[in-house]
Image (cartoon, helix red, strand yellow):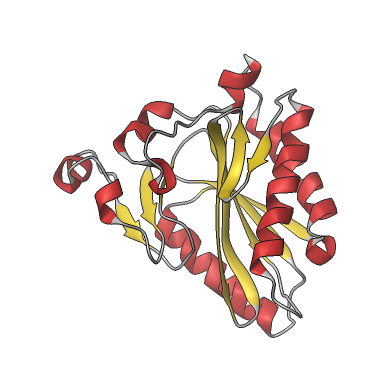
Amino acid sequence: METVWLGEVPYREALDLQLSFLDRRAHGRIPDTLLLLTHPHVYTLGRAGDEANLLAPREALEREGIPVERVGRGGDITYHGPGQLVGYPIYRMEKPDVHKFVRSIEAALIDALRVFRVESRRIERLTGVWAGDRKIASIGVGIRKWVTYHGFALNVTTDLAYFHRIHLCGLKGREATSISVEAGIAPPMAAVRDAVAAACERRLEGYA
């Protein structure tokens, strides 16, 4: 799997890029590819996401220049912003098994977090990665033309106050956390990027 680092990309521009990579992957013109990047502030709602889980008025967010986007992934509402590593695996599935693919992403992120001495886990029936009872990574995957898109968001040095404006992933009472909070250090984004890329290469091979 090839990894491409894009830096900071606005959400809609990144979605257009994903669809371009997806089309090329579907036609066999590129290998499986992991796009890694960061986003400016944005809230995104999955296909079946409940807008009631957005707690801040849209007008207030608009005044701050923070868009709210409805998108074609699974899951409910989440936040993306500075200090968060976002990954979009563009991965062709010969026999689509999205559930298994998501579990492989969770395993990769758990592996990567160990590099920074953050112990994390899955919670049964709750998608994502958790440090204790606080969510450190969100996952929402879509599939089109037998190719995955959308992906995951890992909080590195994210300002967690932005999560107070939503019911995180539609879960009332659940809180977010980050590597910097859990480890007590602020690791360089480049180091996290490299650890995540290596773990994804291992775990997504055959999405085992």
Furthest-bottom residue in view? 27
Q: Residue furthest top?
A: 184
Place of residue 67 in the rendered image (x, y in percent of width and height, measured from the top left): 29, 50
User: Could you tell me which residue is drawn at 70 percent across and 62 percent down?
Assistant: 101
In front of the other: 18 or 182: 182
- Most extreme residue toward the left is 59
- Residue at x 29%, y 44% (from the top left corner): 66
Instruction: Specify the quadrant that holds the N terminus.
Output: bottom right
125 vs 57, left or right, is right
Residue 19 x, y percent position in the rendering: 53, 72
Residue 182: name its quadrant. top right
* Percent x, y of residue 13: 44, 61
Quarter of the figure with the C terminus: bottom right
Give the number of marks: 0
- For image coordinates 47% across by 46% down, the residue present is 39
Task: Tell me if residue 145 comes above or below residue 40 in the rendering.
Answer: below
The foreground one among 27 and 207 is 207
- Quadrant hosting residue 130: top right
Q: Quadrant of residue 41?
A: top left
Q: Nearer the viewer, residue 206 or 63?
A: 206
Location of residue 119 in the rendering, given as x and y in whole percent from the top left corner: 71, 27
143 lies left or right of 164: right
Rendered residue at 77%/30% (across/down): 114
